[in-house]
Image: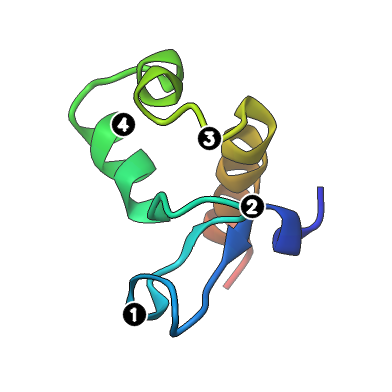
Amino acid sequence: MRQEEIIHSNPEVLGGTPVFTGTRVPVRSLFDHLEAGDSIDDFLEGFPSVSRDQVIALLEISQERVLEPA
């Protein structure tokens, strides 16, 4: 999945806050839910406009960036 299919940022949508593409759901909300101990399924239940594929792809991108050698 290409990054454009996962995350979108537009000054006209939530003041440019990164959101899941095709939604108004801030990416930050996924991390907030995971930090609170919620599962991916819990998050998706609360935000049905976000796809499981988008969530998994975002987590994979995040993992790659964190694990990049310095």
The local crowd at label 4, few if under 14, some if 14 to 19, many if 20 or more residues have their Cα within 10 Å, is some
Q: Which amino acid does label 2 sit on?
A: Ile
CA distance separating discs 4 and 2 = 16 Å
Q: Is residue 38 above or below residue 11?
A: above
Q: What residue type is labelled 1?
A: Gly
Asked where in the image residue 33 lies, by quadrant, the reply is top left
**Residue lying at 59% horizontally and 60% vertically, measured from the top left:** 7
Q: What residue type is labelled 4?
A: Leu
**Residue lying at 38% horizontally and 55% vertically, measured from the top left:** 26
What residue is pinned by disc 1? 15
Question: Could you tell which of marks 1 and 4 lies nearer the N-terminus?
Answer: 1
Which of 45 and 2 lies nearest the eye of the viewer?
45
CA distance separating discs 4 and 3 = 18 Å
Question: Could you tell which of marks 4 and 2 lies nearer the N-terminus?
Answer: 4
Foreground mark, 1 or 4, reads 1
Q: Which mark is residue 49?
A: 3
Question: Could you tell which of marks 1 and 2 lies nearer the N-terminus?
Answer: 1
